Amino acid sequence: MMEFFEIALLILLITTAVGISRVRNLISAVLVLACYSFLMAAVWAQLGAVDVAFVEAVVGAGLATVLFLLTLFRARAQDTQIRRARTPLVALLGLPLLGFLLLYAAVDLPPYPDGRDGQDLGKASTRVAAEYLQKSYQKTETPNVVTAVLMDYRAFDTLIETGVIFTAGIACALLLRDRAK
């Protein structure tokens, strides 16, 4: 049953990705992109990354869609039409070749441990999590494990993520400000 769900999700993702590239109106593109983002949230949840799934659903499918639509509703009707250039021949030939090479290389990847059939879930999900829980206070002197991970172990990554969100907020504020001023 789970394989059917995964295959159905993959087919829906591919369909929405093709749909995004084929639409001729920006409002339609935003709505299809929101569907794609929601499907990606389902993929992350299926993989067990519920925190990433939640962020994808809230920011990708929710907030980004609302901000895109607010921006488009302020635009003129002729500005919402997509004008596409011809696709270069290199892209038409090179991208399928690249996709085939990636699929060919994926055969050599180790199997994804999902816990079915008594498989071990892998060292990352057992050893590292336990070490964070047991030794984070001694190493970081931060009483909250989540804060220790975000601000001590991943501080630079969190800083860049915060900068990206701040920049996106400023860009949206500039786009949505009153043009009469």
Image: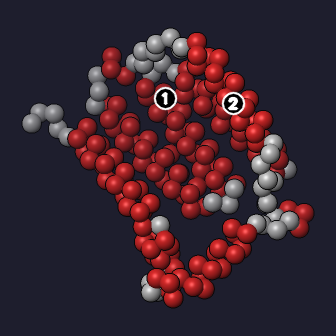
Could you tell which of marks 1 and 2 lies nearer the N-terminus? 1
Q: Residue at x 31, y 53 (%)?
A: 166
Where is residue 103? Give x, y as percent: 75, 36
Measured as percent of width and height from the top left, residue 142 is found at 44, 84
Look at the image and tell me whether residue 8 can be seen: no
Element under disc 2:
helix
- Asked where in the image residue 54 lies, by quadrant, the reply is bottom right
Residue drawn 81% across the image and 42% down it: 107
Q: Which residue is mark 1?
A: 29
Q: Amino acid at mark 1?
A: Ala
Q: Give me the residue at 79% from left, 60% from top.
A: 113
> Dot 1: within a 10 Å radius of its alpha carbon, few (fewer than 14), some, or many (20 or more) residues?
some
| Image quarter of residue 102 | top right
- Which residue is identified by label 2? 99
Q: Residue furthest left?
A: 181
Three-letter residue code for mark 2: Gly
Q: Quadrant of the C terminus?
A: top left
Q: Is residue 149 visible?
A: yes
The circle drawn on residue 138 is none
Of marks 1 and 2, the one in the foreground: 2
Q: Residues within 10 Å of mark 2 (few under 14, many from 20)?
A: few
Residue 94 lies, with reference to residue 52, above or below; the image says above
